[in-house]
Amino acid sequence: MRKLLIPTDFSENALNAIKNAVVLFKYEQCELFLMHAYIDELYDAKKDHPETEFEALKKEIHSTVELKMASFLSEVKKFSPNPKHKFIPLLLNGTLIDELNDIVDRENIDLLIMGTLGEANDSNKTFGSNTIQVLKYVKCPVMAIPKGFASYTTKKLLFTTDFQLPYKRRELKLISTLAKSFVAKIDFLYVSDFKTLSHRQEDNKAFLDSCFRANLIEFHSKQDDNLTRAINTFINEHEIDLLIMVNSRHSFLENILYKSTIDAIGLHIKIPFLVLQNLKR
């Protein structure tokens, strides 16, 4: 049973993320947890209604988001009648990151899926603030779906790697299974100024090779001092459908996430973006 966690703010972008999720995993038995954390809405309401008792306001907000979730679920079920999929709504009075990490641990979640933008829907940004926070702090693989993305074809996957770290078998199996479902090719891209790999890198490359023996794969090596440019070029030249990167200590992705925005370094992602979390869960 595949367990997917999808945070929602009931926006069109959140709905689009679910549309992509049900197509990507249409062949698998899945539990899809639709989660909405409403603590911010509660405190915003308290500022506007200081005279209202907190508990009464809490019940009112809960009732409001309950109605929104019911309406949202009815929309979801219109395009997802798949009997293999079970939707589980969760309305939680807590912060987004804390609640997501609690669910990830409690339910042993395989993958978190969300839109790159939420209700704010700033067209000048690649990722919204909530998505950045999730990519930084939630200890679970995260797939971010760009605004309006609706290709639903996953034939070419790009996995960028420096071969410095051994990856988690569970996360690699998720990618392998997804690729097999769509008979997709996985391209591994190594970008460096150095032509030769160290012994550690060779071992980790062999480990990746062994984990994807059931898949069509190809290893690519590019000499470039600008990793962002190399990734963008490869995506465009090879018509990639899904970009895969790893968030680990001192990695390229961690460096990006802790800058002001991903957009500042030019990684403008128009395809789904899967981030593996090589961090302790």
Image: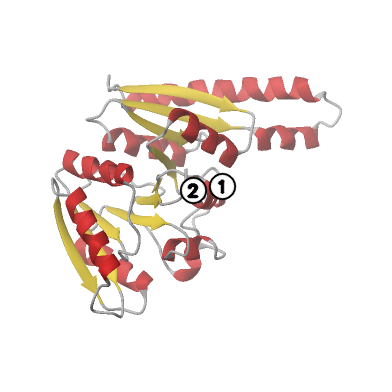
Which quarter of the figure has residue 200?
A: bottom left
The extreme front residue here reads: 199
Q: Is residue 255 above or below residue 91?
A: below
Looking at the rendered image, the quarter that the N terminus falls into is top left
Q: For the residues marked 2 and 1, what is the alpha-carbon distance in whole angstroms?
A: 7 Å
Q: Residue at x 44, y 57 (%)?
A: 248
Q: Residue at x 40, y 45 (%)?
A: 141
Q: Is residue 86 above or below residue 123?
A: above
Q: Amino acid at mark 1?
A: Ala
Classed neighbour count for the residue bearing mark 2: other residues with Cα under 10 Å, few (<14), some (14–19), many (≥20): many
Which quarter of the figure has residue 223?
A: bottom left
Please, what secondary structure does the residue beneath circle 2 have? loop
The extreme right residue here reads: 51
Using the image as rendered, state which of residue 155 and residue 160 is in the foreground. Answer: 160
Q: Residue 25 in the image: x percent, y percent?
A: 27, 34
Q: Name the residue carrying label 2.
A: 117
| Residue 188 can be seen, yes or no | no
In the picture, measured across the screen, residue 67 lies left or right of residue 158, that is right
Please, what secondary structure does the residue beneath circle 1 have? loop
In the picture, measured across the screen, residue 74 lies left or right of residue 36, that is left
Q: Residue 135 in the image: x percent, y percent?
A: 48, 50
| Residue 149 can be seen, yes or no | yes
Contact (CB < 8 A) between labels 2 and 1? yes
Q: Is residue 279 above or below residue 65?
A: below
Q: Residue 107 in the image: x percent, y percent?
A: 45, 28
Which quarter of the figure has residue 177?
A: top left
Q: Residue 183 in the image: x percent, y percent?
A: 14, 44
Q: Amino acid at mark 2?
A: Leu
Q: Name the residue carrying label 1.
A: 120
Q: Residue at x 17, y 48 (%)?
A: 184
Q: Residue at x 81, y 31 (%)?
A: 49
Figure disc tally: 2
